Amino acid sequence: MKTHSRALPPGLLIVGAVCCTVFAWASAFVSIRSAGAAYSPGALALGRLLAASLVLVTILLVRRQGLPPRGAWRGILLSGFVWFGGYTVALNWGERLVDAGTASLLVNTGPILMALLAARLLGEALPPRLLTGMAVSFVGAVVVGLSMSSGGDGSTSVLGVVLCLLAAVAYATGVVAQKPALAFGTPLQITAYSCLAGTVACLPFAGKLVAEVPQAPLSATLNMVYLGVVPTALAFTTWTYALARMPAGKLGATTYAVPAIVVLLSWMLLGEVPAWLTLLGGLLCLAGVAVSRYRPRAQEGSGLRADGPAPGTAAARGR
């Protein structure tokens, strides 16, 4: 009689972690759009990271996980400054100028750069179906970008698009920097100390945050706290858990589902009704995810392992 050492199979845990990340990050775009009406981009970024750091440090203390090894710090600092810090400020600023659905679609062009960087710097493979799926999703992002109506002379919309694309570059760079660090530290350690590094990078906005908190409505402040607890503390931890167990390019492709969810949430919660061309772009994004995640029937029995890192690689050692 066989005994099971784990309550849930590893493959199911990875799928759950990815789903948690995707839905949490989708909700973040809507919360940023809402809180951004009361908080400036830098102040919102700092408030979000402070809330996340408090949660993550508490969990670190409870689980008695100390400092990560020296080999992890390069990735932690780069990921913290560029992704947690730079990405957050750029996205907050961009969402003041474009709607949540458009912002999410522009940011989620990042997985294309992520896959290319991972192939160049981490030696990850680029399967044809992954490239095809990413191309389909990228077309979807372009369609939604073109469907965006620019107000006034259009300059603010152009700036918003540029800021969201900068956020996409920061996102891809942070993920690729974080991947090798997972060979040395746990997902919780890498997430927590990256978040702390990002918080330090955003400290110049402390004066703005202190000045804006008393004037902001309670709903905006609660949205800021939510951004720190769920899309940052929780979702970044589940992300790093999955990143330690599958290629960065492959994992990045799953986030193409985010824009479609954001369009739906912003429609329901913010009243931002998408145009038919926007919906078409969202469907293309989802179709691209389906293509990139497709596995031939012969590989179904191996589950996520078929897409996982080869033995002896940094990701494998991080398991």
Image: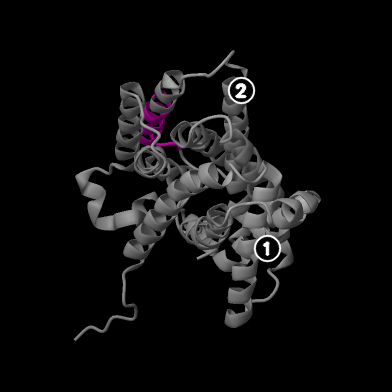
Q: Which mark is residue 156?
A: 2
Magenta part of the chain: 126-139
Q: Between residues 194 and 95, which one lies in front from this camera angle? A: 95
Spot the residue most to the bottom: 1
Identity of the residue drawn at 29% across and 56% down: 303
Q: Between residues 182 and 31, which one lies in front from this camera angle? A: 31
Residue placed under numbered mark 1 in the picture: 193
Which of the marked residues, 1 or 2, is nearer the chain's N terminus? 2
Query: In the picture, which quadrant includes the N terminus?
Result: bottom left
Judge the density around disc 2: few (<14), some (14-19), many (≥20) Cα neighbours within 10 Å: some
Left or right of 211? Residue 7 is: left
Identify residue type, mark 2: Thr
Whether residue 308 is visible to the viewer of this picture, yes or no, is no
**Residue 241 vertical placement versus 88 (above, below):** below
Judge the density around disc 1: few (<14), some (14-19), many (≥20) Cα neighbours within 10 Å: many
Q: Mark 2 falls on what kind of element?
A: helix
**Residue 109 vertical placement versus 318 (above, below):** above
Q: Mark 1 falls on what kind of element?
A: helix
- Based on the picture, tell me whether residue 25 belongs to the magenta stretch: no
Identity of the residue drawn at 59% across and 34% down: 94
Which of the 4 quarters of the picture holds residue 82?
top right
- Based on the picture, tell me whether residue 134 belongs to the magenta stretch: yes
Residue 142, horizontal then vertical, whole percent: 44, 22
Q: What colour scheme has been applied to the protein in the rendered image?
A: one colour
Identity of the residue drawn at 21% across and 48% down: 298
Residue 208, horizontal then vertical, whole percent: 76, 49
**Residue 143 vertical placement versus 256 (above, below):** above
Q: Between residues 263 and 69, which one lies in front from this camera angle? A: 263
